Amino acid sequence: MIKDKKLQVAEIVSGERYENCTFLATPEKFKVSDVSFNDCTFEQTDLSSGEWLDCTFERMNFANYHFEKSLFYRDHFNTCNLLGTDFSDNNWKDSSFDDCRVDYANFSESKFTKCTAQASSFKETYFRYVEFKSGFVTKDCDFDAASFIGSKLKKVDLSKSEFEVLEVLPEDLDGLIINQFQASALVGVLGVVVK
């Protein structure tokens, strides 16, 4: 374990665990593999076009950071602040969010394959024009006012999460998994009037 150090991103070692470290800015694209970050800070808020493979992020603050056009494969975010983070045009595979604040984040035009979320908040988060492959399963999450415009929601499971309003198009709802109490929130999207 490496603790309390200031390091260049290029100095990150595969298989290592970093705790309370600060990573300095880098102008280069980078690839990080098999690393655990715990309470660390990245001075550079634009981490676009990076590759994050088999990484664990614990108690990290990436609020308002930029990760556009990045790859996240088999990564786990635990108790992270991802408020307003830009994850647009990303490719996500076998990754998870647990106990994270992801409100106002942007995942638009991304691809999700076998990803999960648990006990996290996604209020007013953009999932616009996202391709969900093999579903997206959530539990105990808050998706209130999240936007799924242009995203086919087949096998997306929100049934064990909550929302009062979702921004969706009727043609994208086919195969969305919800519970009986959530159905009333989507009736209006289908043009049904309930008296």
Image (tube, rainbow, N blue to C red):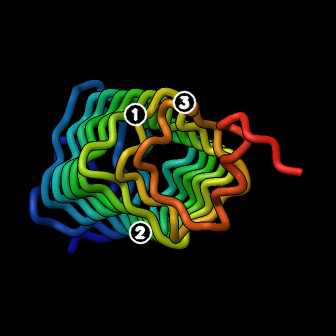
- On screen, residue 152 versus residue 30, left or right, reads right
Q: Could you give the CA–CA distance between mark 1 and mark 2, rounded to whole angstroms?
A: 23 Å
Q: Which residue is mark 1?
A: 130
Reading the image, the residue beneath label 2 is 78
Q: Are marks 3 and 1 in contact (CB under 8 Å)?
A: no
Q: Locate residue 124 relative to residue 66 in the image: left or right.
A: right
Task: Determine the image quadrant of residue 125.
Answer: top right
Residue 77 x/y as whole percent: 38, 62
Helix, strand or loop at mark 1: loop
Of residues 149 and 8, the one drawn nearer to the viewer in this rendering:
149
Q: Amino acid at mark 2?
A: Asn
In the rendering, at what x and y percent does residue 166 appear? Answer: 65, 45
**What's the residue type where badge 1 is placed?**
Val
Dot 2 lies on which element? strand
Tell me the mark number nearer the camera, choosing from 1 and 2. 1
Other residues around mark 1 within 10 Å, as few (<14) / some (14–19) / many (≥20):
many
Q: Earlier in the sequence, mark 3 or mark 2?
A: 2
Spatial CA span between label 3 and label 2 = 27 Å
Residue 74 position in % (x across, y down) = 20, 57
The disc, 3 or 1, on the residue closer to the chain's N-terminal end is: 1
> Which of these two is toward me, 95 or 154?
154
Three-letter code for the amino acid on which mark 3 is drawn: Ile
- Residue drawn at x 47%, y 34% is 172
Q: Count all numbered tags in the image, as a single digit.
A: 3
First reached walking from the N terminus: tag 1 or tag 2:
2
Secondary structure beneath label 3:
loop
- Asked whether residue 8 appears in the rendered view, the answer is no
Mark 3 Cα-neighbour bin, 10 Å: few <14, some 14–19, many ≥20: many
In front of the other: 47 or 124: 124
**Numbered circle sitting on residue 149:** 3
